[in-house]
Image (tube, rainbow, N blue to C red):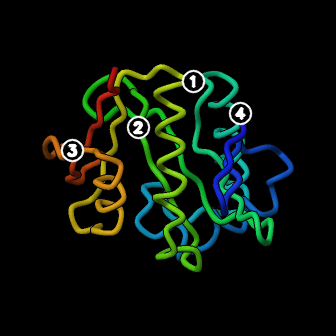
Amino acid sequence: MLLRTKRLIIRPFTHDDETAAIALFTDPGFMAGSLDGLLSPAGARDKLQALIDLYQTHSFSKFALVEKSNKCLIGYCGFGLEPIEGPPVAEFGFRLHPDARGKGFATEAAQLVVADAFTRLKMPFVQAIVEANNTASRRVLEKLGMIHQRQVAFHGRKWLLYRLERSG
C-alpha cells in the first residue's frame, strides 16, 4: 500500500523507519496528549513493531507520513485497534510533529487514508475519538465529513466519538 498526495508519501512503517520513529515517539511535543505518554527508545521500538505487525495482520495501521520535499517522517495517520465501547475496532487517528502542524498535512493525509479504508479495505464506516478541547483535530475530522455521535469513556477520560459512513 502506497498513497501519494502533492506533498506527502503515505505508507506502512518499516524497520527502516526505526531511527526517525524513535525520534518522533520520544519527542514530548509529538507525544503530547497521547495515551501512551512519552516513550523511551525501547518503548518507541515496541510501538514501531506493533504498527508493523498490525499492518501485516489487518492490512491497516497508522501509516508513516513522509514529507516529499525533504523525505522526513513527520507523523502518522491511519487506524489502530481500540476497545472503545466493547471489543477492539478500527479507530482512525493521526499525529504530527509540532513543526508540521497547521500546514494542512493532517487533512491532506486523512482524506486519502479514509478513502483507502472505504475502497481497498471496504470498511462500512470510519470512527475516531477526540478530546473535546482538541479543536484542531476536531476540525480535521469535520472536514472529512465525520459527524459527532456522542461522548464516550475511554481509558478513564471523556472523548467525543465521530463517525463517517461509507456511501454507496
Closer mark to the observer between disc 1 and disc 2: 1
Q: Which residue sits at x=45%, y=49%?
A: 93
Horizontal and vertical percent position of residue 49: 71, 41
Circles 1 and 4 in contact, beta carbons < 8 Å? yes
How would you rate the neighbour count of disc 2 (Cα within 10 Å): few for under 14, some for 14-19, many for 20 or more? many
Of 161 and 19, the residue lying toward us: 161
Depicted 120 relative to depicted 98: above or below? above
First of labels 3, 4 by sequence position: 4
Residue under numbered circle 1: 120
Q: Quadrant of residue 134?
A: bottom left
Residue under numbered circle 4: 1
The span from disc 1 to disc 4 (Cα, nearest Å) is 9 Å
Screen quadrant of the N terminus: top right
Check disc 1 and give the amino acid type: Arg
93 left or right of 112 in image: left
Circles 2 and 4 in contact, beta carbons < 8 Å? no
Horizontal and vertical percent position of residue 94: 49, 54
Q: Quadrant of residue 18?
A: bottom right
